[in-house]
Amino acid sequence: MHYERPIFSEEHRLYRESVRRFFKTEVEPNLKDWEAAGRYPRELFNKAGAAGILCAGFPEEYGGGGGDFLHHVIMHEESGFSIAGAYLDGGLNTDGSAYMIYRAGTEEQKRYWIPKYASGEVVAEAAITEPGGGSDVAAIKTTAVRDGDHYVVNGSKVWITNGNYCDMFPTVVRTGSGSSGGSFSILLIPADLEGVSTGKNLETMNRGCGDLAEVFFDNVRVPAENLLGGAEGQGFGHAMSILADMRLAEGARFLAAAELAFEITLDYVKSRKAFGQRIFDFQNTQFKLAEMKTQLSMGRAFIDSCLAKAMKGPVDPIEASMAKLSMSELEGRVMDECVQLHGGNGFSNEYPISKLYTTARVHRILLGTSEIQKLAIARSL
């Protein structure tokens, strides 16, 4: 899909080309081998750091590329535009937890951690979701009890992207009064501390080559200086702020993946024949494609409008929920139609639409289900 997108500058275009080239040369040729192995190599982050595509939206003084929020979005979009994204499913998009540190961290925390994100030396993922908790962030039970110059952390998290690769987990915990009370805070918990462990790579519908794991904290002693921002009780606000950014960026990724599916399907129906003519020549096919093209164009206008606003101030959390809701639902509809237009071949992993379809299903669940987004939007009314 090709649109005029005036919100992006020449600098953005060059960065987009770098990201696209990285996926094309360093990721796509290896996807089948990585899928067979069940994961991609940890060294992929080091290569991405050396290529300058990690943390491009952070100031140079913190080791970033000196860009802006749109650089962060481009990384997400290119994950959607590339078939590699269906296998990694956002695995290289680690800027979210880096933004958490950049926005809320102390100066020491920012200067220590963000350069390590940017180089690929450190892989870190926000640890928020808990077993049995799902989208209910307020139900978090992981505790952090102050003990002198440390916090003692107990609990577990689940569905942590890159969980077995992570060197550090920015973790939402309850501080103050245990699992039934207290306030939420965020601790930066290094993975090599005694008592931190991860489970095996979780099996999912979309096997891919990503890494999803459960993380366990058993009497982990975390230095008090690792409290994000140096103050207790601010974790919920920090997490919600970053979730707004991530929902908008991921909405852009979901739309990009739907556009990729449309392009793949358009090429397919123009080359595939049935009953003596191209599948494209059937009126039903043309009507389905026309509907999808219209919906995708409307989605693109909305997403770019949200991005333009985000460049002028903080991301509107309600618009971010709208973006995440509408684009994940649109992606699901488009993927389903595209599989149908592929016929039996759409069910075969030999065709990329199959992988795109199974990857897309979780997008209506992660970062807060569609129902959670609807609830947030309704409350704003």
Image (cartoon, grey):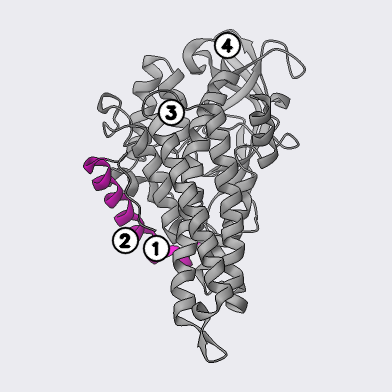
Q: Quadrant of the C terminus?
A: top right
Mark 3: few/some/many CA within 10 Å (<14, 14-19, 20+): many
Question: Which of pointers 1 and 4 lies earlier in the amino acid sequence?
Answer: 1
Residue 99: give its label.
3
Marks 3,4: beta carbons within 8 A? no
Marks 1,4: beta carbons within 8 A? no
> CA gap, disc 3 to disc 4?
19 Å
The residue labelled by disc 1 is 28
Q: Is residue 116 left or right of residue 250?
A: left
Tell me, yes or no, if residue 93 can be seen here. no
Marks 1,2: beta carbons within 8 A? yes
Q: Is residue 201 magenta?
A: no
Q: Which residues are magenta?
A: 9-34
Image spot of residue 315 (x, y percent): 47, 27
The amino acid marked with disc number 1 is Glu
Secondary structure under badge 3? helix
State which quadrant residue 282 falls in.
Answer: bottom right
